[in-house]
Amino acid sequence: MTTPFSSLSLAPAWLENLAQLGYTEMTPIQALALPAMLDGRDVLGQAATGTGKTAAFGVALLARITPRVGRPGALVLCPTRELAAQVADELRRLARPLPHTRVLVLSGGSSVQRERASLEHGVDVLVGTPGRVADHLQRERLDLGGIRTLVLDEADRMLEMGFVETVRAIADATPADRQTLLFSATFPDAVRTLSATYQREALHVVAPAEDVTARITQVVYDVDRGERVAALVRILGAHRPSSAVIFCNHRETCDVVARALSAAGFAAVALHGGMEQHDRNTVLLLLKNGSLRVVVATDVAARGLDIDELGAVINYDLPREPDVFVHRIGRTARAGKNGLAISLAHPSDGRLLDDLRQGPLRGIGMTPVPSAEAQQPPPPAMVTLAIQGGRHDRLRPGDIVGALTTGLAAADIGQISVTDRISFVAVAAAVSEQALAGLAAGKIKNRRFRSYLVLAPA
């Protein structure tokens, strides 16, 4: 039985915004945690990515925010810069009923000077990685004395990455009477200790585990390692997924596979830790908004991927642990949707294959690679345009839509992302030149902004 958001003690403006964002019925973790969090209680939540926990703690912390008081009222700590950016984007959407709320990301790969300037101008909600937050704190650029809500998101991963002492130092710099919300997919002793130290009579809630594999069609192709690139081209041509993430175990393999797919006509790029952060952010943006069809990634780099409608996940290399396999393929069955997972394997994979057959691949046999000639893949349906103006210029998504709909149909406009100094908008590929010309000739909020086409990194 589902529980509607309307059952919560939220003002009509908040409920209306949630409905516009597609939040009408609460997920299990939201139904279990939100009432207590709105009452100001500490919560220890066991929930994985994709369960709706960001919206849960987001609504709770925003309900306790008073914008423009001069110092931040909430802090969310995340293990990776990609997750921090993703959480911040969600908080900005949730904060629409609270005008002038400023959300700032503090993470490696971003300009320290810009972060410092933003902090000096005043911020309401901080989302950051432990290292960068601690750096600003040590340099006395950051005052956490006004924090009313502290969120530790994916706490197990933060501790696994060696951030335990850093997290403790940050928590110690916040008021003792703050609300502390801790979310973790697993509960090792280190997470329990963290909860016991920094939470008061926390309500422990556990989101019921869902067997995502039940909603995923799995296919295992019998392919010798030396033939995998050629086989992958035929497999992609046969299935023609709208989008796909191909997982490799090493960044060098990602580069080789991405180059081979590009040469075969696929809009494919690599995503791994050896790339510049700007290029990684561009890849994530283009895949999420439909401007890129195929990303070849390592597990670490793919942590920032959060796409509701990913056409397929492909295991070019089998992972070393069954849990990693389940996490990979679960990316194609988000928000209750069905998905497709394809694995390239060979009897010579030995123990890796045997372990998976005892778990997520139980009962699934091996299939010969399609022998037909691969069809030419269709190009991405969208392209991305950048506009050199953002929140600092008081631009909002509605302003960009208004500028484009003077010459484009609303159906031709896709996702819009507005950052501090630059905005991105996806438009139908067929009308991209018209859209660029319209932006060059027109004005947004009575100002002209330079715009250009965003290309995937080579």
Image (cartoon, rainbow, N blue to C red):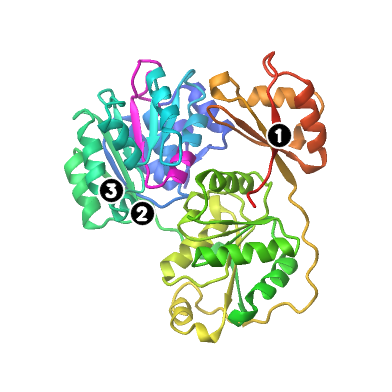
Specify few, some or many for label 1: CA neighbours under 10 Å numbering under 14, 14-19, or 20 or more: some
**CB under 8 Å between discs 1 and 2:** no
**Residue drawn at (54%, 44%) of the image:** 281
Tag on residue 163? Answer: 3
The relative height of residue 434 versus residue 351 in the rendered view (above or below) is above
**Residue drawn at (73%, 77%) of the image:** 370
> Mark 1 belongs to which amino acid?
Tyr
Instruction: State left or right for residue 276 relative to residue 243.
Output: left
- Residue corresponding to mark 1: 452
Quadrant of residue 44 within the rendered picture = top left
**Earlier sequence position, callout 1 versus callout 3:** 3
> Mark 2 belongs to which amino acid?
Ala
Residue 18 lies, in percent from the top left, at 52, 32
Mark 1 or 3, closer to the camera: 1
Determine the residue located farthest toward the top in the rendered image.
446
Instruction: State left or right for residue 272 relative to residue 453.
Output: left
- Residue corresponding to mark 2: 185
- Is 76 colored magenta in this rendering? yes
Specify few, some or many for label 2: CA neighbours under 10 Å numbering under 14, 14-19, or 20 or more: some
- Secondary structure under tag 3 reads loop
- Residues in magenta, as a range: 62-87
